[in-house]
């Protein structure tokens, strides 16, 4: 509150500089006007002051002498409970265990749908190679690439499945590179290999 009062005083001082000079005829001089404003600001700031108390201030609710707001987390200053960490917007569980315990059946179904969707879209690549549509190939390989890898990584529990996923990613990278080089033969070879590698991956789940 003290800081707000100082800022308000500064603003009022600037504004007062633009007030026309007041004469005795107006009944109030410029100096008297400034005193009235200062008294008003002091009156609003008075309730926040405590006798003998030193100023308190903190930085982002983490560093300083002022009491922290809510849980104290930087990303959740209004949390009513302790957060999982100073950087987490979520509260810790009562027993301290993790909320995420693994891929559920619902999540697994959603991940499989993502993989099938990408597989169906990639089936357009041979036709684009025949039509020399290199930009379409690159765009399709890029679209939903993050979701595809996230789904495959989440489902790959065994070392064999993880290895098959990496082989499939490598096939996609080759197709992307050769689309830039406009080399249809290498794209076709990488696509054929990707179909086989994806089939291997799905068999390891």
Image (cartoon, rainbow, N blue to C red):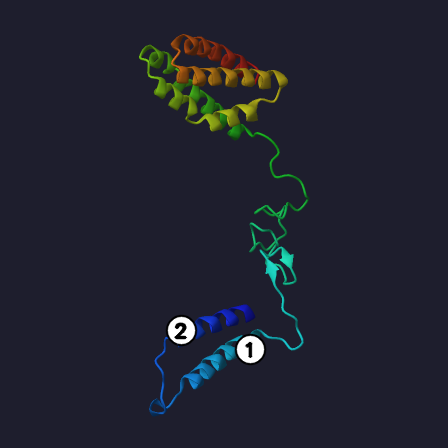
Q: Residues within 10 Å of mark 2 (few under 14, many from 20)?
A: few
Sequence-earlier tag: 2 or 1: 2
User: Residue 196 location, x and y as percent?
Assistant: 49, 10
Outermost residue toward the left?
Answer: 131
**Cα distance between the residues tagged 2 and 1:** 23 Å
Look at the numbered disc 2 and give the secondary structure of its residue: helix
Callout 2 touching callout 1 (CB < 8 Å): no
Asked if one can make out residue 109 in the rendered structure from this viewpoint, the answer is no
Which residue does the image show at 45% across and 83% down from the upper left? 36
Residue 145 appears left or right of 164: left
Determine which quarter of the picture holds residue 187: top left
Q: Nearer the viewer, mark 2 or mark 1?
A: 2
Asked if one can make out residue 33 in the rendered structure from this viewpoint, the answer is yes
Count up the numbered dots.
2
Q: Residues within 10 Å of mark 1 (few under 14, many from 20)?
A: few
Q: Is residue 4 above or below residue 103?
A: below
User: Residue 91 location, x and y as percent?
Assistant: 60, 48
Which residue does the image show at 49% across and 82% down from the upper left? 39
Q: Nearer the viewer, residue 21 or 33?
A: 21
Q: Quadrant of the N terminus?
A: bottom right
User: Residue 96 location, x and y as percent?
Assistant: 68, 43
The residue that disc 1 covers is: 46
Look at the numbered disc 1 and give the secondary structure of its residue: helix
Q: Is residue 129 above or below residue 65?
A: above
Q: Nearer the viewer, residue 81 or 86?
A: 86
Determine which quarter of the picture holds residue 67: bottom right
Q: Residue 15, labelled with which disc?
A: 2
User: Residue 62 location, x and y as percent?
Assistant: 62, 55
Q: Nearer the viewer, residue 167 or 31?
A: 31
Which residue does the image show at 44% across and 18% down from the upper left? 176
Q: Is residue 181 above or below residue 27?
A: above
Q: Residue 162, labelled with which disc?
A: none
């Amino acid at each position: 509150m003290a800081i707000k009062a100082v800022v308000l005083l500064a603003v009022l001082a600037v504004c007062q500089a633009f007030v026309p000079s007041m004469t005795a005829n107006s009944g109030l001089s410029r100096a008297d006007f400034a005193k009235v404003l200062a008294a008003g600001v002091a009156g609003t700031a008075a309730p926040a002051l405590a006798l003998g108390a030193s100023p308190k201030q903190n930085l982002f609710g983490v560093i300083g002498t002022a009491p922290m707001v809510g849980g104290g987390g930087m990303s959740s200053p209004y949390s009513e409970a302790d957060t999982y960490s100073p950087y987490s917007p979520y509260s810790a569980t009562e027993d301290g265990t993790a909320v995420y315990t693994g891929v559920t059946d619902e999540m697994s179904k959603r991940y499989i749908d993502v993989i099938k969707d990408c597989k169906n879209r990639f089936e357009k690549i041979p036709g684009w190679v025949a039509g020399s549509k290199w930009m379409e190939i690159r765009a399709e390989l890029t679209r939903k690439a993050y979701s595809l890898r996230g789904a495959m990584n989440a489902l790959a529990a065994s070392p064999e499945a993880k290895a098959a996923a990496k082989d499939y990613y490598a096939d996609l990278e080759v197709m992307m590179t050769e689309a830039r080089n406009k080399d249809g033969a290498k794209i076709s070879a990488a696509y054929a290999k990707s179909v086989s590698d994806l089939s291997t991956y799905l068999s390891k789940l």
